[in-house]
Image (cartoon, helix red, strand yellow):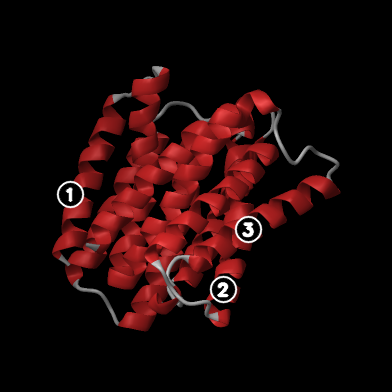
Amino acid sequence: MGALLGLLGAFSITGNEIFSRRISDEFSAIAAAAIASLLAAVTTVFVALAIGGSWVTRDLLIGALSGVGYGAGLASYLTGLRVSSSAVMGPTVAALFVLLPFSYAASVDGVPSAFGFLGSGLVLTGLGFVTIGGGAASNVRAGVTIGIRAGLGYGIGSALLIEISEDSGQWPIVAQRLAAFVTIAGFALLRHQPVFPPRRYTGWAIAAGVFGSLSSVFVLLGYAVNAAATSVTASLFPASSVAAGRVLFGDAVNRAQVVGLVIVLFGTVAIVLA
């Protein structure tokens, strides 16, 4: 179940990326990240009310700290896609996104089985084929630098969620997304950049916010079931992003990427078996 929830989280991350990237490419990556985070917080309030849960101060603080990482991660990721390419950003972000929470979960819950390690290795290998196989990368040095920053933000933010108790429901995610918005908005104001995009992007922003909320909800639920498996399968978002790019934007998909998707599938099966 943890692996399944992680996959749903990955698909939701892709949905958030699709709509956020529309705003980022046409207007501003920072504004796209800010509005998506704010609307994700609003969406998660309704989810939290439906699911229930207590206001646990410790969990809310952890959620807020996680949001600082997520805010830095999202803003950096969208910026990196404009500066460099997904062939550089994808594997860099995905590797840290999965390795940090998986390593932390393994240290807390005990060493995973051999299938868990095998599946993790296959997933990372497959993601490398999926993203690096996309063609010649541009601005590699800048892309790797920004990708490391984004990956650290996402990875640390995700690892922190492992410490949240089930008693608080989804309220820590509300705190997370609000903190992400405050982090991004503060950065935008310091750089004298717009915090919100023009009204013509309202539809894209709402869609990005809904998917952003669902991504964190699924991941948090997955961590409560199996943190290690969730952290790995949630990192499949570059694979689903490639598929969405092919269908929605007509992106070219070469043989190396197809091989990568197959490897990722086998890796996911190994994690589920673990």
Residue holding disc 1: 266
The outermost residue toward the top is: 250
Type of amino acid at the residue the image marks with label 3: Leu
Residue holding disc 2: 60
Q: Quadrant of the C terminus?
A: bottom left
The tag earlier along the polypeptide, 1 or 2, is 2
Q: Is residue 23 above or below residue 42?
A: above
Q: Nearer the viewer, residue 15 or 148?
A: 15
User: Does dot 1 land on a helix, a strand or a loop?
Assistant: helix
As measured in the structure, the alpha-carbon distance from the residue carrying label 1 to the one carrying label 2 is 36 Å
Determine which of the numbered discs, if any, sits on residue 178 in the image: 3
The tag earlier along the polypeptide, 3 or 2, is 2
Across and down, in percent, residue 39 comes to 58, 46
Q: Nearer the viewer, residue 61 or 66?
A: 61
The tag earlier along the polypeptide, 3 or 1, is 3
User: Does dot 3 land on a helix, a strand or a loop?
Assistant: helix
User: Does dot 2 land on a helix, a strand or a loop?
Assistant: helix
Q: Is residue 2 above or below residue 199?
A: below
Q: How many marks?
A: 3
Q: Residues within 10 Å of mark 2 (few under 14, many from 20)?
A: many
Q: Determine the residue positioned at 68% across, 27% down.
A: 199
Q: Determine the residue positioned at 32% across, 56% down.
A: 6
Q: Nearer the viewer, residue 211 or 69?
A: 211
Which mark lies nearer to you, 3 or 1? 3
As measured in the structure, the alpha-carbon distance from the residue carrying label 3 to the one carrying label 1 is 37 Å
Residue 199 in view in this figure: yes
Across and down, in percent, residue 132 comes to 41, 36
Which mark lies nearer to you, 1 or 2? 2
Q: Determine the residue positioned at 50% across, 71% down.
A: 160
